[in-house]
Image (cartoon, rainbow, N blue to C red):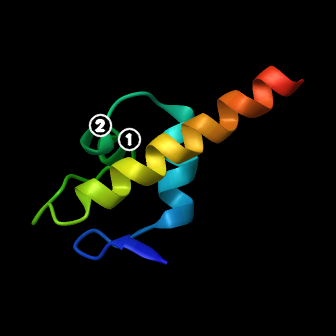
Amino acid sequence: MYICICNAIRETDLRTAALGHGGDAEATYATLGKRPNCGQCLGKAGEIIDQERALASCENVAV
């Protein structure tokens, strides 16, 4: 699913970038070589980034 239509950022790309870098949605977009245009996606993108990082930290604790 596309999270950012303006930049054609898919959810899977966003989740992968979230694990490789810290920061908010805008910083994560930058790691993909993109920057927000209209900004409507930033709220949902932030939720996905937080969710992915939380899942990763739970997996690291369980190991």
Badge count? 2
Of all residues, the one furthest to the left in this rendering is 38
What's the residue at 68%, 35% (across, down)? Answer: 56
Tell whether 21 sits left or right of 46: right
User: What residue is disc 2 on?
Assistant: 27
Dot 2, crowdedness within 10 Å: few (<14), some or many (≥20)? some
Q: Quadrant of residue 27?
A: top left
**CB contact under 8 Å: marks 2 and 1:** yes
Q: Tell me which amino acid carries mark 1.
A: Thr
Q: If the image is split into quadrants, where does the C terminus sit?
A: top right
In the rendered image, residue 13, in percent from the top left (x then y), is placed at: 52, 59
In the rendered image, residue 29, in percent from the top left (x then y), is placed at: 32, 48
Query: Is residue 50 positioned above or below 12 on the image?
Result: above
Cα distance, mark 2 to mark 1?
A: 7 Å
What's the residue at 59%, 36% (across, down)? Answer: 54
What's the residue at 38%, 41% (across, down)? Answer: 31
Tell whether 13 sits left or right of 23: right
In the rendered image, residue 14, in percent from the top left (x then y), is placed at: 47, 55
Camera-near label (2 vs 1) is 2
User: What residue is disc 1 on?
Assistant: 31
Front residue (pair 41, 32):
41
